[in-house]
Image: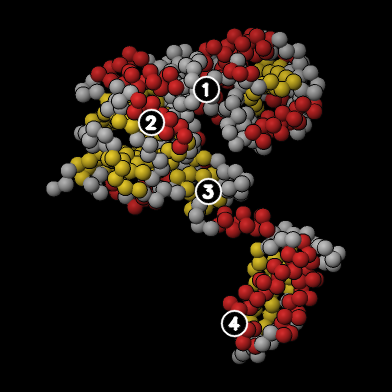
Amino acid sequence: MKQDRLIYLPLGGAGEIGMNAYVYGFGPDGKERLIVVDLGVTFPDMDTSPGVDLIMADIGWLEENADRIEAVFITHAHEDHIGALSHFWPKLKVPVYARRFTGRLAQLKMEEAGLPTDALRIVEPRPTVVEAGPFSVQFVPVSHSIPESSALVIDTPAGRIVHTGDFKLDGSPIVGEAFDPLMWHEIAKEGSGVKVLTCDSTNVFSPLPGRSEATLATPLAEFIAAQSGMVVATTFASNVARLKTLALAGKAAGRSVCLLGRAMKKMVSAAEETEVLLGFPGTVTPEQAVDIAREKLMLIVTGSQGERRAASAQLSRGKYLGLEMKDGDTFLFSSKTIPGNERGVIRIMNAYSEMGVEVVDDRGGLYHVSGHANRPDLEAVHDLLKPKILIPMHGEHRHLREHAKIGTGKGIASEVATNGTMLDLTGNSPEVVEYIGAGRTYLDGNVLIGAMDGVVRDRIRMALNGHVLVTVIVDEDNLPLGDAWVELGGLSQTGKTGASLSDRIEDELAEFLERANSKVIANDAKMDEAIRRIVRQVTMEEIGKKPEVTVVVSRLLAE
Ligand SMILES: [Zn+2]
């Protein structure tokens, strides 16, 4: 009989920041019972994934082993942890466990996708235990930049795993639970202690201890009180604590507060319904805000990352819901620009600048703090939990590597395991046992496609090179019926000679068809190759480009 083993398999989030999806398994080799931690998304960009709506992990391996999955656990409601739930749940159809606020947002996602919500199970935090096959799982509150973020304490017959989720050490997070060192001390002491720590690595390169959300209240209140025009502030909609700090600072400065943006209202109401947000000051609607003097008004808006359709971008283009920024107003980014989003953010900053609006960013941390543990905080957690094994997660490769180095330096067996790397954690040090094909899945319109399926590669080629469509009609005797017909897409209509490019191509093709023998004309592949070559030759001469070419040969069949 094969020995039971404990395995770990990241499918997303290890080697990148985004689309988190981690698998743990326990049982005989190849028959382990499985749990999944988080099903998140990441966002596309114009360079690598133009036109794609969302990017998520490739869960092919999970689908193949769907009958072995006991449950999905969601640590918190950030999109990179929960965003793929409604896309993947129909393929997995297993119970989904989350705490109240996270569960409420999961419920909304499932409902929006027209899916049943009875698989969602709302769990109270530790000491409540969820039994899932060989796993006993507790949600342990941690502080982060969204309410009710949780680490998971996962007890298995092979020992205790602590999966941190996203966390920081914040003793006064304004909204949600503080980091509780006593509880973590208990977790480290119980039984035979912590065997495996799977740990957030996002801020491993930040050398100073992280700062508390509470440190922002005074600087923000002073800043807002000092402004004379309208104040507009933006942050992540899900950072409910920050929304509260900003709103209280606005109120303290004698301003009415108005929330703009669908995501922000959704987050605040979900937080109020689940009672994680208490004491949020009263707000006014945009209709009411229009009639309030601008020096008595503060807007809190979505779009801290420069998203084109969010409220911050709408206001940078002019009037939005009757409200408009003017010379003398102030726009505050109480946020950090995520790498990759700089262009969108700078576009908005410049648009405001042209309006005479003062744009202020986090000014070296005065108006924003991170939601992730910095290096000294990570080290404090290593020291507190004293794991035998450290598996860095939630980071790009450089983050994972640096974090593993810290672990090794402390004598903790540490391993960099990127997406698709299956580790055996049964022994005293992690062992790589298998590589699973772990690619990416794209939500493109309303279908899921594989990143390597060629769909987006074709789209990128057409976008970069332009497209030429050639149609030729051939009769029963393999003779061209009339001339070839050319249509251009995404290409200049005229080139070097000043003649119409499509006319030039059509002329060359007419000559070719006149010369071509019937054997060539009868053969689709030969026609395709010859026509493609002529089109590319002419376009290269005329406009210096080699476009994508589609050749359509329509053949009239003899009766
Ligand atoms: Zn997060």
Residues 418 and 39: in front is 418
How many marks the image carries: the answer is: 4
- Hey, what amino acid is under mark 4? Asn
Q: Position of residue 60 (x, y in %)?
A: 39, 51
Q: Position of residue 517 (x, y in %)?
A: 66, 87
Spot the residue most to the left.
1
Q: Mark 1, residues whose alpha carbon is within 10 Å: few (<14), some, or many (≥20)?
A: some
- Hey, what amino acid is under mark 3? Leu
Residue that carries the numbered disc 1 in the rendered image: 370
**Residue 304, image quadrant:** top right
Query: Which residue shows up at 76% across the image and 71% down it?
Result: 505
Q: How far apart are labels 1 and 4 at the CA level?
A: 64 Å
Mark 1 and mark 4 lie on one chain; the one further toward the N terminus is 1
* Badge 1 element: loop
* Badge 3 element: strand
122 versus 19 height, above or below: above
